Image: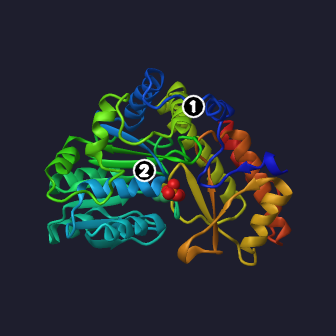
Amino acid sequence: MGDRDLVMIPGPTNVDPKVLLSMARPTLAHTSGAFASIFRETLADLGRIFKTGGAVLPLAGTGTLGAEVAFSNIIEPGDKVLVVSGGYFGDRLAEVAVHLGAAVDTLEVPWGSAPVIADVDKKLSSTKYKVMAAVHVDTSTGVANPAKELGELARAKDVLFLLDTVCSMAGMDVQVDAWGINVCFTGSQKALAVPPGMTIVSFDSKAQRVREQRKTLPASYYGDLKRWLPVLADPTKYFATPAVNMMYALHEGCRMVLAEGLEERFRRHARMASAFRAGLRAMGLRLLCDDAVASNTLTVAYYPPGVRDAEFRKSMQEEFGIVVAGELGPLREKAFRVGHMGNVNRSDILATLGAIEGSLSKEGYKFQLGAGTSAANTVLTR
Ligand SMILES: Cc1ncc(COP(=O)(O)O)c(C=O)c1O
């Protein structure tokens, strides 16, 4: 199989050859007019995808850098931050904020559940926080957190709202301005379907004012919004060399997202997710989260008793050429994760379910072979 592997992990996702080929073009001078127009178009497209009129900053780096840049512009040492966490990447947000000197409280939500808004409200009422941070879709659980409601709450409590949309942007609706997300970041390698290597961070006018009025310098020099704003206004200006060929890929990726149409893309993701979940359930598998809180970008399923994680995933890859992901933290070896975002189509869903059936069967799990693909097909042909 090798180079024909179908990558069904929750990022990086399968990249269209058009995006890959865009990177093979000659590397333009980063301050040239030709590159500036690519940069400008990409910024405009990212604004449409984020649904924001705020500043959108694409940087060479991954989602983790996005978290650092997001926090480092708006927090100063000792600032109080509340992180609402129900998984590995929520905990990661708290770690980043601590690393940057914030005083962090974490509101822990059980893995597989979404936060109860009244609990968050209570926590926000107990202390004057400067920032509330959350993950939209935590890639360790597949839960889609109620970002809109969290945004409304943050606005009501006059707290800055910082949201990690690494595993949702361009696969599920994210309305940065309408939902009051003051700082939002994502990565290129998930639903945007661009190779890993770019992070994008948006700052609304309130977050920009907070950066402008801070008393101390941001912990990140490279990620200081103030140094990038002149480049965003005129990309022929220099602050740090943009990753020119990665910007080609992001440019092409954004064009493909918008050519499909955001709402159409969200519908496709919803359809693929519901077919996939129907397939897993028809095999008798138990999913980590209820449909009411399930994201459309990935699914987490528990292994039936007796099925071994490493052997199952080895069979998936070696016998079927399909790569799925193991779990993290407390669910390690107890469940597996499948990403269905970006360019995912019906064939990918059916092939993955077929391979899961084969690999579970090889591990000795007894069920009706074909039940999963059949249930998914019923949804997909509806
Ligand atoms: C929700 C979420 N946040 C942050 C990250 C970190 O991003 P990266 O691995 O690109 O640094 C990931 C990575 O999978 C993620 O899924």
For the residue pair 92 and 373, the one nearer the viewer reads as 92
In this rendering, the answer to whether 106 lies above or below 144 is: below
Return the mark for residue 8: none
Left or right: 307 with respect to 161?
right
Q: Residues within 10 Å of mark 2 (few under 14, many from 20)?
A: many
Residue 351: image x %, image y %? 77, 47
Residue at 84%, 59% in the rendered image: 318
User: Disc 2 beta carbon < 8 A from ligand 1?
Assistant: yes
Q: Quadrant of the C terminus?
A: top right
Which residue is disc 2 drawn over? 165
Residue 211: image x %, image y %? 20, 50
Amino acid on which disc 2 is placed? Thr
Residue at 52%, 44% in the rendered image: 188
Tell me if I can see residue 138 in this picture: no
Left or right: 37 with respect to 154?
right
Which residue is disc 1 drawn over? 27
In this rendering, the answer to whether 187 lies above or below 334 is: above
Amino acid on which disc 1 is placed? Thr
Element class at badge 1: loop
Residue 199: image x %, image y %? 45, 47
